Structure formats: C-alpha cells, structure tokens
Image (cartoon, helix red, strand yellow):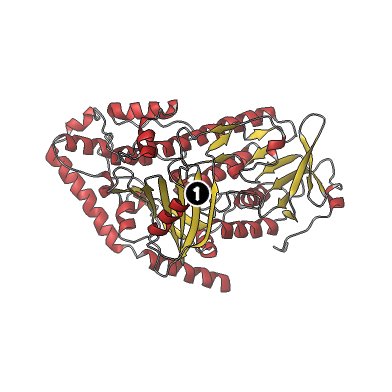
Amino acid sequence: MSSVCNEIEVTETATHTSSSRRIVIVGGGIAAWMSAAALAKAVKLEDWSICVVHDAEADPLAAFTAADATLPLSASCHPALELDEDRIVCATGGAFTFGIALSGWSDPGATYFHPFGSTGAGLGPVAFHHLVMRLRSEGVPLRLANYSLAALAAQAGRFCRPGENPRSVLSTCRHGLHLDCEKLSAVLRKEAESMGVNCLTGCMTRAELADDGTIAAIVTATGERIDGDLFLDCSGSDARLIGELKDGGWEDWSLWLPCDSFVAAHIATSNAPPPYSIAAATRAGWIRHLPMQGATWLTGVYSSDHCNADEALAALRESADRAELEEVLTGSIRFGRRTQAWQRNCIALGSAAVAIDPIATTNLHLLRSAIDRLLKLLPGERSARAETAEYNRLTALQQDHARDFAVLHYKLNGRHREPLWDACRAMPVPATLDYKCRSYESRGRIAMYDEEPLEEVSWLNLFDEHGVHPRRYNPMADGFDAAELKSHCERVRTIMIEELAKMPLHGDYLSSVRVAAGKKASG
C-alpha cells in the first residue's frame, strides 16, 4: 500500500462487519504512529481495522518533545516493528549515546557522568561497588564511573555497538539514541500505512458515548463520524478524547518535580555530535543539550516561581555559547500521570497519559512499554475489565518508578543557598523512593521493584555521585586482601582503556552507518 495518506470516506466506517474490530487513534505525533505501526504489525488486518485521525497540532507539548533520547532498552524503537536501528538514525539525523553528563547537580562546579551499561567487575558473589566501598573505607579514592567503558568512551568521543560476547568488555556497554521525534514519526507513519493503516486528516471535536458509557464514535471538525471499538488517545497533554469520559483524574507531581515551564530551540552544528547528552542545572531548573547530526536540540525546564520566561531564554542562549537559536518555543508543563490510563474502551498514550521531567530520559521508554503492554492485553471485546485493571496497575507502577528516579536528582542536589534547590532537598519524597533511599543508605542495596524502567546501575551511580555512602558494605568484601582488590580494579581499568583505543570516533561510526545505509537502499 502506498505511504501516501489514505483518506477515509465516512461511508466506509459504516461498512465494517460485526466480526471486524475497529481501532481508532486520535493524534498525529509519535505516540499515534508508533502505536499504529506496532498494532498493524501485531494483528491481522483482515480481522482488525486501524484508523489514525491525524491532527498534527494536537499536542501542546510538541515543542517540548520535539527531540528526545531513548534508554538502551528502547533504542530500536519498538520490538514489534523490527525497524533497523541504523535506518532510524539515518532517517532522523540522530546519533548514538552512551549516557548523560550531568553538570551542576551534585555541586554547582562539578560534573559527573551517568553511563549506560555495567560498572566494573565483581569478584565472586561480591558486586563491584561493594569492593569499591571496602577500598574507600581504607582511604583509597575511587570513582565508579572511571570503571565504566561506556563513560570512558563517551568522554573520549568514541562509539561502537556493544559486543554480544559476555566475556568481552564490550558487553558491559549499553547504548541509546538521540532522535528527532518529528522525523521518527514520519518513519513510523510510512511503516504503518504500508501495512494497511488508514489515515484521516482532521481534528476531533467531540466523542459520542454509547448507552453503556463507552465511546461509540468520534466526530471531527468537518462533521465526519468515525465509529470504533477501541480508542487510543494520542492527542497530547490536553487528552481531549479520554477527558470526555471523566472517569479518572490527573495525579500532580509538582510537589516533587517543581519545574512547570519550558523553553526549547535548536542550534546548527557542523562538528560530529558527542555520544552523550548534557543536563546542566541552573539556579531555577536545568537545560538539556541533545546533540544530533547537524544540530543540537536545547530544552530548558524551569520553575516559574524562581525564573521568568526572559531569564530562562537568556540562560538557554548562554548555554548555547551565544549561538543563534532557531525555532524558539516556550510553554508550560504539568508533570504527573493519569490516575487511570485505560478507561472503559479508551487508552491514553504518550503525554496524554504521563508527563515526566526529562532528566529521567524515560518518555520514549514509557511510550514503548505502554504499547507493548497494550499488545499483550489487547481486548477481544469492548468491555475488558480484567485487561483494564492489569494495564492500569502495571502502567502506574512503571510511571511512578520513573518519577522516583527523576525526583531523586532534585532531592540529592548539592546546590546550596538557591531557593528552588534548597526547597527540593527539604521536600518529602514518595514512599517508594524513601524505602529505596533507606535501603541503599543502610548497606548499599538497591531495592528494585517490579516494572522498573531504569536499571540498578543507574540508581547506584546517582546515589554515589551525589555523595550518598552506605553505612555498611557487603561483609564478604572483607574476605579479599586490599592489595588484591587494588590490583583487580587496576586490571579492570586497563582492559577498558585497551578496548577504548580500538573504538572508532563517534563521527566516523556515524559516517560508516550512513554509507552502509546508502548501499543498502541502492542495492
């Protein structure tokens, strides 16, 4: 089928047989097209019809989410699509990433690195960070990130895909992607339409409810009526479709995530992008640099109680070293989640379901996981109480754990005598995060819950770099001689340095990807 938008006549919506299940997706961004493509890949389109009511201006947060980064688990977009990662990078002008450099969070003058992948190498049953704690107790100054190949490679501007051989040090690396979300949406739309997804360009104005309270159809601004059995609300933070059901509310996270405004822009760049992003804390929030091929996307989030829009823009311009800012956009944002992402026969996805501070780098991951969860719980009938309950349970768990990871950055900040940051250190945290903090402070154990979007090493690195040191380490670490432990750490670092020297520069790796993609396309 052609990738050109397939316009749907209203009469066609009335010709579905009773055996055909109709999925209607409202919205025009990445949430709409990722879900459409994944569903089209997973179901038989002779049994299901999928229609996207495409509204390109649906999401007020489109500027906020114009570019994003993936966690390693969602680097390849969505597993159901089997999209080639190199193709995605080339089509979006994207880049690879080994992690995040965080500046000014633990201390106004300090920078640390959040690497993807594991750190160091344990000895027997003793994890590496407990060996490091043992050596620190004897006065040996060690930094965990110095034993991460991903961190070393990122800071050297080098990249190659992690190895699959578990005996190779390359297997300790993980990687994500930096992506232009608008371009990625175009890739996903083309994929979806090639598999038979229909598209109707228009704006939804209202929903028509059936006698049982479920959504029977939506009506567009031009009066067209689209019937459906299952509706996906991808309309953005306004949540215009699921909002008509009025069954659930919005759980506000502003107590823990105080930034309520943003300013976004991008700058042209000619140098190869570094294989990492930057998150630089400021007096009233923080600024993210997301480098890609030919451009760096800048997003500043800030508290309007501590900074006005002009000051935020000035901070963004200064962060860009006075480079010319292009397509400057501002807006407000409310971090939180929908109390029930699935209500009756409507499911909210993307920013209609959750908005989270991007310091957690989890927005795309949460979207991918939500779609994967939908595929597993896809209902066979309009009333699906068991599936709805399970979907909402798992979705809320994952969103809350992602929130906790973001909150911990604010709670542990080391910026003193700045009102925003002083208040963040003093704030109470959610019970799930409080337990995680107490567990780590006690003996260096990371309590991992079900549906955690971040890996244990991410939590460990965050605690450690912010100076949270456990009162005790694993007593089995005392079974090793201190000299033996020092030798082990030196050996681990030497192996990593040797492997680092073999890695190509990130720019050269991207060039090889573009060349290979060109040959594949022409062949």
- Inspect the image, locate mark 1, and give the three-letter code of the amino acid beneath it: Phe
- Is 373 above or below relative to 160? above
Circle 1 residue: 262
Q: Is residue 241 visible?
A: yes
In which quadrant of the rendered view does residue 313 lie? bottom left
Camera-side residue: 303 or 347?
A: 303
Residue drawn at x 55%, y 53% is: 63
Q: Is residue 304 left or right of residue 495?
A: right
Q: Is residue 50 visible?
A: no
Residue drawn at x 22%, y 28% is: 475
- Is 253 above or below relative to 165? above
- Callout 1: SS: strand
- Is 193 above or below relative to 248? below
Residue drawn at x 60%, y 60% is: 187
Camera-side residue: 101 or 126?
A: 101
Mark 1 packing: few (<14 Cα in 10 Å), some, or many (20+)? many
Image quadrant where one finds the C terminus: bottom right
Give the x, y percent position of residue 507. 39, 67
In which quadrant of the rendered view does residue 19 lie? top right
